[in-house]
Amino acid sequence: MKIKRHRRVKKALNFYKNNFNFRTPYQVLVDSTFCHEALKCKLNIMEQMPKYLEDPNVRLYTTPCVIMETEGLGPKAYGAMRVVKQFKVRKCGHEKNSTISAEECILSMVKDSNPEHLMVATTDPQLSSKIRTLNFRYMRMWY
């Protein structure tokens, strides 16, 4: 990892450790868009994530909603679907009969000040901005 990126990651992790009580082993919720981009760049998420977060015991999770949405995309997302299915499945509490998007599912898991201290790995800009606004609201209440 490049030195600037390493410093930026270390600084962000220390911020979340000190202010929000994130602890090791980190729990990362992986989205299908992240898996698709990793596949395009030929990166193995299970190898690289522990190196990136400097924690050999990183736990990578996905949700049933993410898997169902990826399966519904068809053959263009076959590789991402195979990658997503490698991770442990974390129950999200949604019924199988209801159709909920992966974005809404992930947002429901990290809302209410993220009590399980989940990190989200995604490349979707809309989802990232929504998660940031959730964190900003919580930070404003916290300070």
Image (spheres, rainbow, N blue to C red):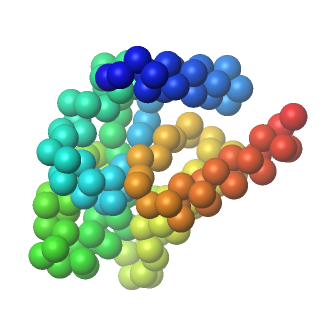
Going by the image, does 29 lie left or right of 12?
left
Q: Nearer the viewer, residue 82 or 132?
A: 132
Note whether residue 87 is visible. Answer: yes
Q: Relative to residue 138, is residue 79 depicted above or below?
A: below
The quadrant where residue 54 appears: top left
Residue drawn at x 42%, y 81% is: 99
Q: What percent of the width, then of the height, locates residue 85?
A: 20, 55
The quadrant where residue 98 appears: bottom left
Q: Nearer the viewer, residue 64 or 5?
A: 5
Residue drawn at x 16%, y 74% is: 76
Q: What percent of the width, then of the height, locates residue 71?
A: 22, 73
The quadrant where residue 15 appears: top right
Q: Relative to residue 129, is residue 70 depicted above or below?
A: below
Q: What percent of the width, then of the height, locates residue 6?
A: 43, 21
Quadrant of the snapshot with the C terminus: top right
Q: Relative to residue 138, is residue 129 depicted above or below?
A: below
Q: What percent of the width, then of the height, locates residue 26?
A: 44, 29
